[in-house]
Amino acid sequence: MGRRSDKHFHKKKVEISQTIQLPRSWDYYERFKQPFLFPFQFNQIEIKQSPTGCRIGSCVWDCSIVMSKFFELEVGPKGLKGKRIIELGSGVGLLGITLSLLGAEIILTDQKSMHEILLHNVKTNCQLNKTTVDELWWGDDISRFNPPFDMIVGSDLMYEDDCVDLLLKSLLDLSSFHPKPPPQYVLEDVLQEIEEEQKLKKEKQLKEEKEKELIENNDNSDNNSSNTDELLDKVSSLSIEEEKQQETLTSTAEKEKKEEYVFEKSGLLQPADTIIYLGYEHRQMNAESLFMNQVHRFFDVETIHTKHLNPGFQNIDIRILKMKRKNLSDNISPETTTTTTTTTTTTTTTTTTSPIDTLNKET
């Protein structure tokens, strides 16, 4: 079967067989101007796209199409019914809506600018009592979502270098148990008192040492008193200058440490049994390499190739990472590198091929 990009086909509701070849997102030559129709369980999911919305998030991407079909055919309702799931970077919502229709209780998250079109697609296709839309900025506090979740999903999230650490932090936070924090005002007061006490003690100690040293070095001088006063003034000036330099160095070091290890504290949280599925199109982007270099520190990772799911996607390399938190004792240092386990999933049938391959061959 060839690619289906005929207008009339997309506009009418039809009973769609599982043997149909999935449309590519780029098959919609009037992209954004018409809804994307996804074949699903002898029906279809209708996803509105936006010609005026956010350029990246306001359309259906190939990865979300493949992931949706993966969950429909490989995981199915038995693996999803009643599961508490959160999706990161939902965009127009195809993947999250598919999981909802397969029985999951899911929260679709994205920035506020995407909520209008996302809510429209959810209301068009889903039961609102088990499918919600919310805002989540990666790296921000996630306590209101009440983690951990049974499952976390995301499609095509690894494309911006600056967001890799924030994405990893959110994945760790949402797949971990969180201890109840102490009252904020108590913690801040204690830390401030300790900091002020240490600062005063350091200043006093430094001044006493400098005074003693200068007095000892000048005790044989005829003008001992005047020389000492002058030198003490110099010491005082030097102490102030040294303190300023030290504060600058400390501030810079703390800032660099905060930027470099934004997810480190999250990696120390108690792991839950959360399963994470992250799909992405392999484009050899730098963000993908950055993510892979860090993710093995905290997660066991299996790579699932998806070309067997449908012949329409044979020429693109879409992969799904199946991830689960390591035990805390198994977390590894950033210098240690690991390799990804690569597998191709199949559904148990009378042959070694997947059902969608078999059906497509028959047609």
Image: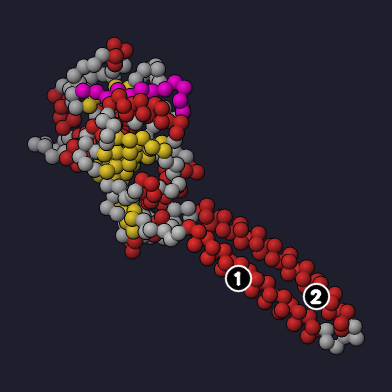
Left or right, residue 143 beside residue 83: right
Q: Which residue is mark 1?
A: 198
**Outermost residue to the left:** 350
Nearest the viewer among 230 and 264 is 230
Q: Main secondary structure of the magenta part?
A: loop
Nearest the viewer among 188 and 204 is 188
Q: Where is residue 267, by image quadrant?
A: bottom left
* Residue plotted at (83% across, 79% down): 228
What numbered label is drawn on residue 232?
A: 2
Q: Earlier in the sequence, mark 1 or mark 2?
A: 1
- The secondary structure type at the circle numbered 1 is helix
Q: Is residue 81 above or below residue 34?
A: below
Q: Is residue 54 magenta?
A: yes
Q: Is residue 89 above or below residue 258?
A: above
Disc 2 crowd rating (10 Å Cα; few below 14, some 14-19, many 20+) is some
**Outermost residue to the top:** 8
Quarter of the picture containing the N terminus is top left
Residue 240 at what x, y percent from top left? 73, 66
Magenta residues span 43-55
Nearest the viewer among 211 and 287 is 211
* Residue plotted at (33% across, 26% down): 121
Q: Amino acid at mark 1?
A: Gln
Q: Is residue 21 above or below residue 223?
A: above
